[in-house]
């Protein structure tokens, strides 16, 4: 399949299209930085105001689940990068295998997250009546925990879907391997990984010593 | 072999090398969290996370070989985020609260023990 098959309106050539995809996805990432940044800011303000409550609350997070998930996402990012490189070198099999591996690792993350959520709920760590921890400000930490990890999980699930659709398109040869779209898909995936890299110390490593 | 945009094709070496560096940093962050560092654990963990993000953005998201314009867009979100943090904390860190014993007002962040409920 020729490069012409990948070319879309209104781009005059594939190079311009690739630049357009890159600029567009990075603009989206910049807006996502501000979206998650607002959550990080709220967390930081309340942790500054109630450091002891946050220390008590964070001790209840499961550092094993969080660490395993960090390793899963880091590995998925490496797989995604190899997929991008392979696609630009027209290595079809490697591209599809690495996209599949990326999806598999992302799905593994969600499964581990599900186990963690199940444990958290079993321990009653959901803000509201009968919350097991004191002082009451510990609920603030867990409110941020549920919102931030939940929004991240939604982003990751979206990423798995997007990677899956793109892998299907490549598998059916509806787009050539060198399509610039894979750069956009990969950049989004890496950003979701970035968010977890920041969340990990904020939620799982608070005052463990 | 080169990429469609003319840049030289990369091998697997770079993603694997960056992945190893990221895993080592992640384990270092996890391990250091259990070493008493007199309040420096969180700054260290966040510094390691910052290095990990820089590695990821430069070498896996390939910012290092993209145009300066893309770098500018990538940094723009962080710049506006820094303004948001600076302006917000200029408020919260300078708020005055009544002193517990009745004396002159002090910074609220200096009264964290009381506001924590202990």
Image (cartoon, helix red, strand yellow):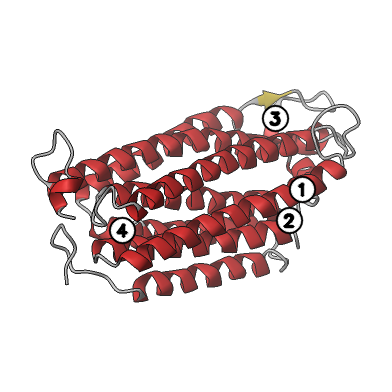
Q: Nearer the viewer, mark 1 or mark 4?
A: 4
Give the mark nearest the N terminus, 3 or 4.
Answer: 4
**Label 4 near label 3: C-beta < 8 Å?**
no
Residue A196 vertical placement versus A28 (above, below): below
Reading the image, the residue beneath label 2 is A207
Q: Which mark is residue B106?
A: 3
Residue A188 falls left or right of residue A122: left
Q: CA distance from mark 3 to mark 4?
A: 48 Å
Q: Residues within 10 Å of mark 1 (few under 14, many from 20)?
A: some
1 and 2 marks on the same chain: yes
Q: Residues within 10 Å of mark 2 (few under 14, many from 20)?
A: many
**Label 4 near label 2: C-beta < 8 Å?**
no
Camera sees residue A103: yes
Residue A47 falls left or right of residue B9: right
Q: CA distance from mark 1 to mark 4?
A: 37 Å
Q: Which mark is residue A169?
A: none
Q: Which residue is pictured at 82% across the width and 40% down the height?
A: A125
Q: In front here: A13 or B116?
A: A13
Name the chain letter of the residue that bears numbered label 1: A
Q: In front here: A31 or A15?
A: A15
Q: CA distance from mark 3 to mark 1?
A: 24 Å
Camera sees residue B39: no
Give the percent coordinates (x, y) of residue A55: 77, 48
Give the percent coordinates (x, y) of residue B8: 18, 68
Q: Which residue is pictured at 40% across the width and 42% down the height?
A: B78
Residue B105 vertical placement versus B13 (above, below): above
Reading the image, the residue beneath label 1 is A55
Provide the secondary structure element on which disc 2 rests: loop
């Amino acid at each position: 399949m020729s490069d012409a098959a990948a070319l879309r309106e209104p781009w005059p050539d594939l190079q311009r299209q690739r630049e357009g995809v890159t600029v567009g996805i990075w603009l989206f990432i910049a807006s996502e930085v501000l979206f998650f940044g607002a959550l990080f800011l709220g967390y930081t303000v309340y942790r500054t105001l109630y450091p002891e409550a946050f220390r008590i609350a964070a001790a209840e997070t499961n550092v094993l689940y969080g660490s395993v998930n960090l390793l899963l996402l880091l590995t998925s990012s490496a797989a995604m990068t190899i997929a991008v490189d392979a696609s630009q070198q027209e290595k079809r099999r490697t591209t599809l295998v690495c996209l599949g591996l990326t999806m598999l690792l992302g799905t593994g993350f969600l499964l581990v997250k599900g186990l963690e959520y199940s444990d958290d709920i079993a321990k009653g760590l959901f803000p509201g009546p009968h919350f097991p921890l004191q002082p009451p400000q510990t609920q603030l930490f867990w409110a941020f925990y549920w919102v931030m990890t939940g929004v991240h999980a939604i982003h990751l699930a979206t990423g798995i879907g997007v990677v899956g659709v793109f892998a299907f398109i490549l598998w059916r040869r509806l787009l050539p391997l060198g399509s610039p779209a894979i750069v956009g898909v990969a950049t989004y995936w890496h950003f979701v990984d970035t968010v977890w890299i920041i969340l990990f110390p904020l939620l799982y490593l608070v005052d463990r010593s | 072999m080169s990429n469609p945009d003319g840049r030289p094709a990369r091998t697997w070496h770079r993603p694997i090398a960056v992945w190893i560096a990221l895993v080592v940093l992640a384990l270092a962050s996890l391990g250091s969290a259990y070493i008493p560092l007199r309040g420096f654990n969180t700054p260290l963990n966040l510094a390691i996370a910052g290095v990990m993000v820089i590695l990821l953005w430069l070498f896996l998201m390939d910012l290092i070989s993209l145009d300066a314009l893309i770098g500018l867009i990538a940094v723009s979100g962080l710049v506006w985020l820094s303004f948001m943090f600076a302006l917000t904390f200029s408020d919260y860190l300078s708020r005055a609260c009544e002193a517990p014993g009745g004396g002159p007002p002090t910074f609220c962040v200096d009264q964290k023990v009381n506001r924590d409920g202990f």
